[in-house]
Amino acid sequence: MSTQVPTDDLESDPRVKAVFDDIRAFRGTDFINNMWLWLAFDPALLERTWPEVKEVVGKPSSIDPLTKEMIYIAVSVANNCTYCVHSHTAAARAKGMTQEQYGELLAIIGLAGKTNQLATALQVPVDDAFDASRRNR
Amino acid sequence: MSTQVPTDDLESDPRVKAVFDDIRAFRGTDFINNMWLWLAFDPALLERTWPEVKEVVGKPSSIDPLTKEMIYIAVSVANNCTYCVHSHTAAARAKGMTQEQYGELLAIIGLAGKTNQLATALQVPVDDAFDASRRNR
Amino acid sequence: MSTQVPTDDLESDPRVKAVFDDIRAFRGTDFINNMWLWLAFDPALLERTWPEVKEVVGKPSSIDPLTKEMIYIAVSVANNCTYCVHSHTAAARAKGMTQEQYGELLAIIGLAGKTNQLATALQVPVDDAFDASRRNR
Amino acid sequence: MSTQVPTDDLESDPRVKAVFDDIRAFRGTDFINNMWLWLAFDPALLERTWPEVKEVVGKPSSIDPLTKEMIYIAVSVANNCTYCVHSHTAAARAKGMTQEQYGELLAIIGLAGKTNQLATALQVPVDDAFDASRRNR
Amino acid sequence: MSTQVPTDDLESDPRVKAVFDDIRAFRGTDFINNMWLWLAFDPALLERTWPEVKEVVGKPSSIDPLTKEMIYIAVSVANNCTYCVHSHTAAARAKGMTQEQYGELLAIIGLAGKTNQLATALQVPVDDAFDASRRNR
Amino acid sequence: MSTQVPTDDLESDPRVKAVFDDIRAFRGTDFINNMWLWLAFDPALLERTWPEVKEVVGKPSSIDPLTKEMIYIAVSVANNCTYCVHSHTAAARAKGMTQEQYGELLAIIGLAGKTNQLATALQVPVDDAFDASRRNR
C-alpha cells in the first residue's frame, strides 16, 4: 500500500520519458525500479532527483562505488527508510559487497547507534581537540 | 553543560584505570577524549563500550579504516549526535580524508536524507528484484 | 500485525462510546479509523488524544485546513510513521490537495531532509541575524 | 539562542497566570522552568500541555514516578531533545535515581540504539509468536 | 564549534562567487547566511544545493511562500536540525508569520509528534480506506 | 521481505551453535526468535550482541525486569524499529505488564514525543538548575 499509484502510461509525458531513457542508458538495463515510477507523477521532482543520484552516486569520484553504497545504507538505516535499505543493500551486493563486509557494515552501524545514544544521553561536551577552527584558521 | 560530570579521580577505580590504560596503549597517546571520561562513572558500561569500539573500528578488517569513519559519520549525522559528528569527522581527517572526499561524503549523506524522505512520504513498495530471499534460498 | 488488538465490543465502555460518538458527530460519518479503535483499550489515553486532534487540526484557525494536513504529513514523514503518512495524505486529498501541491510538498520535505543533514554534518553555527532575542527584547 | 523569547510580563495574561499558579501549587515551589516560560506566548498551547504533563507524569498511577522519568529520558534521548534530556535527568535524580540505576538506564538505551539499527538494517521479519492478534482474539 | 571552517577568500573561486552572486541578486541583499559559507568548500555541493533551494522554496508555485517555510520548520524540528529550525523560523517571520500562526504551527508539530509515536507503538494497521490504489487505478 | 536470509544449517557453525545453545539455556526454551537467526550470518556480530542483551536486560540488577522492557519499548518506538517494538512489547507482557501499565507507557511515550518536538522547535535554553556540574563538583 502506498500513498500514490503510478499510472500505466507514465512515459506518455516526454519529460518522464527523457528521464527514464537516461536511467536505462546510464545503467544499461530496461529495468526501472519503483522509486522512479513513484516519483514520475511530478516530472519536475523526477528531474531534480535522478540527475543528482546519477551525479553523486553513479559517477567515478574520490570515493569508490561500493563505499558510496555502504554510506547510503548507513544513512538509510538510521533514517529508517525501508525502501532505501532494500534498494541500496541490493546495489551494494551488485557492486561486490561480501558477506564479511556486510557483517562489518552492520557492526559499525549498530555500534554507532549505541554510542550516538550514549553521547546524547550524557550530553558529552565536544573536546577542544576536535575543534576545526583550531586547524583551518 | 552535561547531565553528568566526571570526578577528578576516575582512575582510582582499577576497572576504569584498566580501560584507560588500554585506550592509551592502543592509540599510542595519553589523550583520553571526553566520551570515555563521561562513561567512566559506570565501569561496567565503560568495559562494555570501549572494547567494542576497539574491535569494530580499530582493528584491521575487510573495510578500510577511513571508510569505517565515514560510515560512522553518516550514522551520527542521521542520528544527530553532535559529539559523534565532531569526534568522527576529526578521526576521519586524521586517517587521511581529503576535502574532496569530505565534500562527496556530505553529498551522499544529504542526497540520502532527501531520497529517504521521498520514499517514506510515498511509501514506495520494495521491488521484488531487491528481495534477498530470491537470491539466498 | 500490531501490538494490541481491539476487542469487538469497544463501545460497551461508556467513555469509549462517548469519544466515538463525538468523532462521528464532528466528522459527520460513521467511519472510525483504526487509530481510535487501537487507542480505545485505554479510555483515558483516548480521551486525552481525540479532543486535542479535534481542537488543533479540526477547528477553524489562523492556519487553513489543507496547510495543517500538509504540515502533519511533513512531521509524519520525518518521524517515519507509516500509519500517519497514509492517514494524513488521505486527509489532505480529501481537503483538496492537488497533485501539483503534493509534488511540491514532497519537494520541500525532500529538500529539507537534505539540508537538515548537511547543516548537522557541518555543525553550521546559527547566524546572529536569526537570534530571536535581538528582536523581541 | 532560541527561536522565541518570553516577555517580562507573561503573567499579566490571566490564562498564563492560572497555569503558572497551578505549576507552583502542584510542585510546591516558586520555580518555573524555562519550558513553561517559552510556551506561554501561546496560552492555548500552554493550557493543552501542562495539564497533560501533570496528569501523565505527576499523578500516582500503575507506573512509579522514577520509572516514568526514566522512560521519559529514554524517549528524549532517542528523539535527541537536549532540553528534555537535561530536565528529565534532573527530575529522575530528584526522585531518587542512583548512579547505578543511571548507568543501567544508559546501558539499556545504548543497547536498544544498537539492536534497533541492526533489526532495521536486516529488515528482520516479526516472529509469529509476537503477533498480538493470536493472543487477544 | 563546527566541523569545517570557511576560508576568508571563498569568492576567489569563480564557481563560489557565481553562486553567491546569484544568492545576493535573488534575495536583494548582501547578506549571505552561514549555510552557504559552510558549503562553499565544495563548489559542486554548493552548486547542487542553492539552485534547488531557490527553485523549491523561492519561486512562486501552488503552495504559498509562508506555508513552504512552515513545512520546512516542521521537517527541521522532527529531524532536529538546530540551524535549520533557526533559519526557517526567521524566514517564516520575515514572510509574515504571526505569533498566533506560530503557536498553531507548534501545536500541530507537537501533536503529530505525539500521535506518530502512539501509532508506531501500537503498530496500528493502515485502514483500507486510505489505500491510494483504490482511488487511482 | 528482508535484506538477508538465514541459511537452513546455521548451527553447523560451532560459534553460532554455542550462542544459540546459550540463548536456549538462559531462557529455558527451544524457541530462537528471528533476530538471532538473522544475525547469525556473521558469528562475530552475533557473539557481540547476544551476551550484551543477556547482561543488560536479562540479569537481575537495580532496575526491575519489567521496567527494563518498558524502557526498551520506549527507545524502539522513538527509533521506529518495527521488529523491536513487537518483540519487546511481547516480552513486557510476558513479564507481567498489565493493560493499565501499557496504556500509561504509551501516554508517557506520546507526551514525550510532543514535548520533545516543542522544546526543539522553540530551542528552549536549558535552565541553570539542571546543570549537573553545579551538583557534582
Image: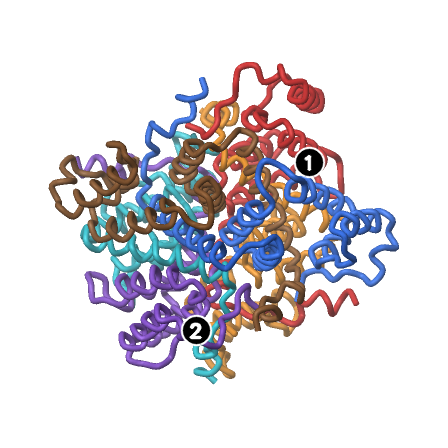
Chain colours: A purple, B cyan, C blue, D red, E brown, F orange
Residue A10: mark in rendering? 2
The residue type indicated by label 1 comes to: Glu
Q: Residue at x 66, y 57 (%)?
A: E122
Say which element carries label 2: helix
The residue indicated by pointer 1 is D52
Q: Position of residue E82 (x, y in %)?
A: 41, 38
Say which element carries label 1: helix
Q: Position of residue B134 (x, y in %)?
A: 47, 83
Instruction: Examine the rendered structure and indicate whether residue D5 appears above or below residue B83.
Output: above
Q: Is residue A55 left or right of residue B137?
A: left
Instruction: Examine the rendered structure and indicate whether residue D19 appears above or below residue E87.
Output: above
Mark 1 vs mark 2: tell me if same chain: no
User: How far, Cα to Cα, is label 1 from label 2?
Assistant: 49 Å
Q: Is residue F96 visible?
A: yes
Q: Residue at x 43, y 59 (%)?
A: B116
Seen as rendered, the residue at the extreme bottom is: B137
Q: Is residue B136 left or right of residue A93?
A: right
